[in-house]
Image (cartoon, rainbow, N blue to C red):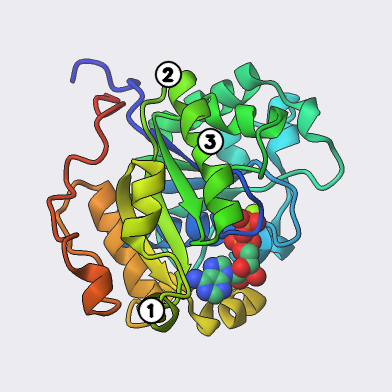
Amino acid sequence: MDHPQVATGQVITITSGKGGVGKTTTTANIGVALARRGKRVAVIDADIGLRNLDVVMGLENRVVYNLMHVVRGAVDAERALIRDKRVEGLMMLAADQHSDKDDVSQDEMIQVCEDLRPHVDYVLVDSPAGIEQGFRNALAPADRVILVTTPEVSAVRDADRVVGLVEAAGKGAPVLVLNRIKPDLVARGDMMSTADVLDILRVDILGVVPEDAGIVAATNRGEPVALDAASRAGRAFHNIAARIEGETVPLLALDETESRGFLKSLSSLFRTGQDGG
Ligand code: ADP
Ligand code: MG
């Protein structure tokens, strides 16, 4: 109260283990959904991947400064942010397409996030796949960790390893976003259900996002689906944002068997790092 400069923003890292499961999609859409709730949100691209955060958000043509400029001290973190003109309060820090993940240290990532905290309510860090340096850099500044997986054996197995690494890093247990669920396949027993995945990972569920062809189309247009809160996947991301803010929102009723038994209180999911100012 007496200290206007006290850092307030929370850092949430979105990670996975396996690549291509929807981290960047999740980061962009949670960013949109939190900003639509009136929050100030900075999304940071800590990955250099096929579909980068700037492309998914449709901001690639407006990138002037990137993370490496900030790390090298060429520009302040806050000045390097690109403002999204569609959503008040949404900002992005791009990745450098020309440098290597090893060019940034954990301390430098922590410092970038510290510099942003006073300016925003949330910093969302889009992590690279794997468990190498880039993953550790993305994890280092996190107050909370969101683990994304699809209901495939290989993705869940990699996610399981990441649960241990996140806990070992002192970040508490991550919470899960289960992405690309196909209710018809689950009903036929051809796809793991939410319950199956939770049985293996033993973490709390933050949200379930259905397979939605609209996501691919939206990504190609640079328009995160959460811009359209009426779309099925868009709704899922808005529910996730509400839960991040401590609201109790039932999981999307993908179908009866999927949703039954999961309408428990979700407000206490994030137990660590709650007191950021
Ligand atoms: P990551 O960042 O983990 O590598 P992306 O977010 O780039 O993964 O997603 C990989 C691909 O999967 C992209 O083409 C994206 O559009 C698609 N995708 C992600 N989530 C969904 C979904 N729920 N339904 C359909 N396609 C999806
Ligand atoms: Mg990605």
The image's mark for residue 183 is 1
Q: Secondary structure at mark 1?
A: helix
In which quadrant will I find the C terminus?
A: top left
The residue lying toward the viewer, choosing from 223 and 238, is 238
Between tags 2 and 1, which lies in front?
A: 1
Q: Quadrant of residue 75?
A: top right
**Percent position of residue 262, x then y:** 19, 59
Amino acid of disc 2: Gly
In which quadrant will I find the N terminus?
A: top left
The residue lying toward the viewer, choosing from 36 and 193, is 193
Kindly report the distance in space between the C-alpha atoms of the residues bearing marks 3 and 1.
26 Å
Amino acid of disc 3: Val
Q: Which residue is mark 3?
A: 162
Is residue 224 in view?
no
Q: Which residue is mark 2?
A: 170
Work out whether mark 3 precedes mark 1 in sequence or the reverse, and give the earlier one.
3
Q: Secondary structure at mark 3?
A: helix
Q: Secondary structure at mark 2?
A: loop
**Identity of the residue drawn at 36% across and 34% down:** 9
**Identity of the residue drawn at 31% across and 65% down:** 238
